[in-house]
Amino acid sequence: TPSVREIFDSMAYGPAPESNAEVLAWLSKHKSFGHWIDGAFTKPGQTFETRNPATAKPLALVTQGSAADVDAAVKAARRAQGKWGKLPGHARAKYLYALARLVQKHARLFAVLESMDNGKPIRESRDIDIPLVARHFYYHAGLAQLIDDELPGQTALGVCGAVIPWNFPLLMLAWKVAPALAAGNTVVLKPAEYTPLTALLFAEISREAGLPKGVLNIVTGDGDTGAALVNHADVNKIAFTGSTAVGRKIRMATAGSGKALTLELGGKSPYIVFEDADIDSAIEGLVDAIWFNQGQVCCAGSRLLVQEGIADRFYEKLKRRMDGLRMGDPLDKCIDVGAIVDPVQLATIRGLVDSNTEGETYHAACDVPEGCYYPPTLITGLSAASTLMQEEIFGPVLVGMTFRTPAEAVELANNTRYGLAATIWSENVNLALDVAPKIKAGVVWVNATNLFDAAAGFGGVRESGFGREGGWEGLMAYLKPIRVSKALAQVKPLAAPAVIEASGIDRTAKLFIAGKQARPDGGYSLPIWSPKGKLLGHAGLGNRKDIRNAVEAAHAAKGWAKTTAHARAQILYYIAENLSARAGEFAGRLRDLTGKSGEAEVEATIARLFTYAAWADKFDGAVKSVPLRGVALAMNEPCGVIGALCPDDAPLLGLISVMAPAIAMGNTCVLIPSEPFPLAATDFYQVLETSDLPAGVVNIVTGSHAELAKPLAGHLDVDAVWSFSSTPLSALIEKEAAGNIKRTWVNNGQARDWLAASDSHAFLRAATEVKTIWVPYGE
Ligand code: NAI
């Protein structure tokens, strides 16, 4: 043993191992696990080992779930859902509260088991993972308590399937299970194959909470088990966290099924350090950003962008800090960096770093234990396009480059296909809060990093997925409006009469792109007949080139997002006023097109414009009370470019019901109007032209929905796609949207009464992304 003097000199820590006795006792009671279905463990089936990555020793055997196992779990969840969903919110709140209490009561067992199964330092599982799990259940007990009063008219989706990764095994379970149960759904959850144990322990403990059987079911297994759950016909929603590649597969697999979907995928989150930052804090932040959980964090600050003037000093300090990190046995309480989850993941990390030939690679000079460990690593001097600057490494590897100006920092930060999180360090509040809204990400931390809380929404944009977890916005992803929906019959264009009579002057309506009327690229148009067989005019037949032009125009008009909400409201009122001045003419046009009186539709359209003009400056964000220094702002930002197939059955009102919320929230849009009755939309160009709307904010391409849906939904510069078309295109649109994981909102063949409810909250939510910005506030 070293002398006191030697200890003082080296300042080295002695080992401080956490006891694993309680975990070993629990494991030896089970040894081999079945699934947790209908409130009990099933008999183990075909099993595989789950190992401790720090020791390579097996911990237990778990069952590879078959399609039949998944089916049994879904059936149990379905049987339980009716009663569970009808409980008063208070009753569900009591169960969630009991679960929170039990997580706290068994916190040590959970923390040790998590560290053994995953390899993460006990300091993290004990101080971060498990407390956040308890907090999540407490918070959602509160949402369940308030749901009946606060969200009348909403109901549970039904049975939710959850597929989760291995990096935060129990925390990801909490993120899926707590909101699902609070909203009245039942759950079938598949944990990751590397880390199934805390989920099984949680299931066993849920019995102590008296959770009714079937409300929570756990089926273990690999990706095939996950796929069986995703493909099960009686599942109403899939909530997934994991890689972008698998997220894309799930988007394809669920396309057109009517299943609700949220995806929380990968990232390559920028960590921006301005020269006026508190450097020591920014260095400490980096330890939490990229060496927390061995960098196996979807929102890891893995891309360091540091301002040129301080870069050399910053890198030097950083290397010194890296050298001081302690790697080793995850159960040692003094350990900073633990084991990589599995040798497969270690090989991936190594492969990515070793294949890089650019820049300089620095491995921390700390002791690296034998086995499944990778040293903290910094790679500098890469170019923005380098593989390691673009690809998620999902390990303790930081890549860094420099920038000169704030504008360049923003450009580099956004130079990624992902958009999960970002960190900004600057002592200048003006600079930090000027940059925050410009970053394409779902979460932004100012002078802090990797902060999480149940009250604050978490989730990404772009290829980091869609949907938020946490807060009221997260709860909404587990609810749907109570509405009896009817099937939507296809509305076909009216056929030409047997005998075509000579009509007056031929009128061919063009497309509306970049504020101008444009001839369709193909040069074709379609005759539009009235029910009485009268030729009403021609409508341009748009093609994929026209869609591309329209998207380009919509992109160029993105400055619209920066106009004030007041200005957007004024323009919507002005459109309403100009439409109102021509109400009679539009009502006549609608009558000619559909054979039905158009007056009510025109009146409703004007009212709808007023509704969204009113909302433009009232769909507010929120300030979340988080139990950390500071507050979390939930800002409603526009999605970007929204492409929409408008309803066939309400040619004018449908178009406006889609356009108005989109532009009120600062989006630009490409609209494909009613296919059978497009002339109401083409007449509307003139209203737009006289209403001060900047060119490109609204673009309209008439034509065949079946043909235009594909290029619109597949376009990489479209951020969200909606369809209310009566042509059955939901599956095609959701498949095409998988390319860049864009958000979709499709009708799945269900009708909507456009005249009756405006359902404005649903439209406003679809037209916005919640960006959570954590800012220091108060002491
Ligand atoms: P993964 O995305 O393959 O696994 C996540 C979950 O999905 C697991 O439960 C897995 O069994 C399941 N799964 C796999 N294929 C499926 C399918 N076709 N249908 C349904 N479920 C399926 O992630 P993996 O293989 O564990 O890690 C690979 C890479 O993914 C990592 O190196 C990292 O880059 C990334 N990743 C990102 C995470 C995040 O939080 N964003 C979490 C885990 C991994």
Image (cartoon, helix red, strand yellow):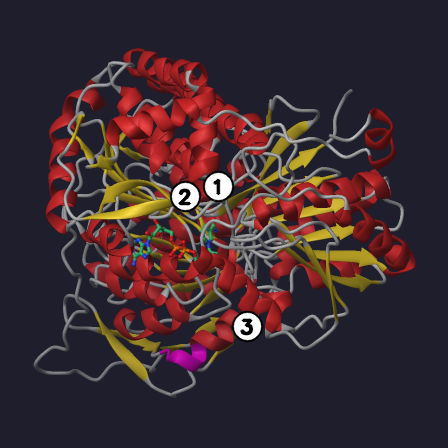
- Secondary element under disc 2, as helix, strand or loop, is helix
Name which of mark 3 and mark 1 comes first in the sequence.
Answer: 3
Q: Is residue 753 visible?
A: no
Q: Is residue 58 visible?
A: yes
The segment highlighted magenta reads: 542-546
Residue toward you, 45 or 98: 45
Where in the figure is residue 145, as x and y percent of width and height? 37, 14
**Would you call the spot at circle 3 few (<14 residues within 10 Å), some (14-19), or many (20 or more)?**
some
Inspect the magenta stretch and tell me whether residue 85 lies in it: no
Residue mark closest to the camera, 2 vs 1: 2
Q: Are marks 2 and 1 in contact (CB under 8 Å)?
A: yes
Quadrant where the C terminus lies? top right
Q: Is residue 501 left or right of residue 26?
A: left
Of the residues shown, which amino acid type is indicated by label 3?
Answer: Glu
User: Which residue does the numbered mark 2 point to in the structure image?
Assistant: 763
Of the residues shown, which amino acid type is indicated by label 2?
Answer: Phe
Disc 3 from disc 2: Cα separation: 24 Å
Where in the figure is residue 773, as x and y percent of width and height? 64, 38
Disc 3 from disc 1: Cα separation: 25 Å
User: Which residue does the numbered mark 1 point to in the structure image?
Assistant: 612
Where in the figure is residue 161, as x and y percent of width and height? 26, 42
In the image, the residue with mark 1 has its CB under 8 Å from the nearest atom of ligand 1: no
Of the residues shown, which amino acid type is indicated by label 1?
Answer: Tyr
State whether residue 27 is above or below residue 420.
Answer: above
Residue mark closest to the camera, 3 vs 1: 3
Disc 2 from disc 1: Cα separation: 10 Å
- Secondary element under disc 1, as helix, strand or loop, is helix
